[in-house]
Image (tube, coloured by chain):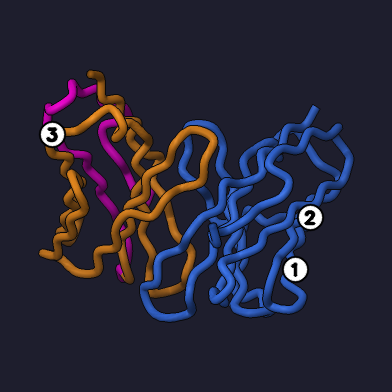
């Protein structure tokens, strides 16, 4: 059973067309939820950490939110350079491993 | 740039050969992690070190895999008797040893088994 499920698997947006990516998770005790961006052939690049329900973090056109069962990554007025795979990961109190979802592949066209 | 450095970036080898990868973490980070990523999947945790101690291992880390961090600085991951299924991107990450510190990843070593 997957602990972390991301949807949609792929998303195509026009430049300026805002949308949200979803990450639903099932853990016994959440230490933290992490969002990463990954470009082809590169390692994941850290974006945000969220610790508790109701928390929000923002960076440029990205805003991450957290509830007890899911997290959303909102992308406002995206640009082509926002095209990448966005990965969500959870860390439980039982350890320090990150458990990743499969990611959402985002393509923003001009 | 003082990010996580991995070497080599690409490795092609024949089935049955042994391979070794190296990871140099961010200098002040005392936690170091290894992950494996296959196409279309998120990274999967393999193992992690705090300083030189290996504290957690995944079920994915079969007895053909061994990782070391001899002086609490760089780390090596060795795969013995490679198999086709070992073809993947091997990612290293590092973090500070404080609660909720993010893991910062290198750009990985891509392993291809012929």
Residue A53: quarter of image: bottom left
Q: Residue furthest right?
A: B17
Real-space CA distance between mark 2 and mark 1, rounded to the nearest whole angstrom: 9 Å
Real-space CA distance between mark 3 and mark 2, rounded to the nearest whole angstrom: 45 Å
Per the image, label 3 sits on a secondary structure element best described as loop
Residue A52: quarter of image: bottom left
Q: Which residue is mark 2?
A: B78
The magenta segment is A1-30
Q: Tell me, for residue B10, which label it has, or none.
A: none
Q: Tell me, for residue A77, which label it has, or none.
A: 3
Which chain is displayed in blue in the rendered image? B
Q: Which residue: 18% across, 59% down?
A: A57
Count residues near mark 2 (Cα–Cα under 10 Å), then give few for <14, some for 14-19, many for 20+: some
Residue B88 is left or right of residue A55, and the answer is right
Count residues near mark 3 (Cα–Cα under 10 Å), then give few for <14, some for 14-19, many for 20+: some
Q: Is residue A77 above or below residue B6?
A: above
The answer to whether marks 2 and 1 mark residues whose Cβ atoms lie closer than 8 Å is yes
Mark 1 falls within which chain? B
Q: Which residue is mark 1?
A: B68
Which chain is displayed in orange in the rendered image? A
Per the image, label 2 sits on a secondary structure element best described as strand
Do the residues marked 3 and 1 share a common chain?
A: no
Q: Position of residue A59 (x, y in %)?
A: 21, 53
Q: Position of residue B104 (x, y in %)?
A: 47, 60
């Amino acid at each position: 059973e997957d602990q972390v499920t991301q949807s949609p698997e792929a998303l195509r947006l026009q430049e300026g067309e805002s949308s949200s990516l979803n990450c639903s998770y099932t853990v016994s005790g959440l230490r933290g939820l992490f969002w990463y961006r990954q470009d082809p052939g590169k390692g994941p690049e850290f974006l945000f950490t969220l610790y508790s329900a109701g928390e929000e973090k923002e960076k440029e056109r990205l805003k991450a939110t957290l509830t007890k069962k899911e997290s959303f990554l909102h992308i406002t007025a995206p640009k082509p350079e926002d095209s990448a795979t966005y990965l969500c990961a959870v860390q439980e109190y039982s350890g320090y491993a990150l458990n990743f979802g499969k990611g959402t592949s985002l393509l923003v066209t001009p | 740039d003082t990010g996580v450095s991995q070497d080599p970036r690409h490795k092609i080898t024949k089935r049955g050969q042994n391979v070794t990868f190296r990871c140099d973490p961010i200098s002040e980070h005392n936690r170091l992690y290894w992950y494996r990523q296959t196409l279309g999947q998120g990274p999967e945790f393999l193992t992690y070190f705090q300083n030189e101690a290996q504290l957690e291992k995944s079920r994915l880390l079969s007895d053909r895999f061994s990782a070391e961090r001899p002086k609490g600085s760089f780390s090596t991951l060795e795969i013995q008797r490679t198999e086709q299924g070992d073809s993947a991107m091997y990612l290293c990450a590092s973090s500070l040893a404080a609660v909720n510190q993010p893991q910062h990843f290198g750009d990985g070593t891509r392993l291809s088994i012929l």
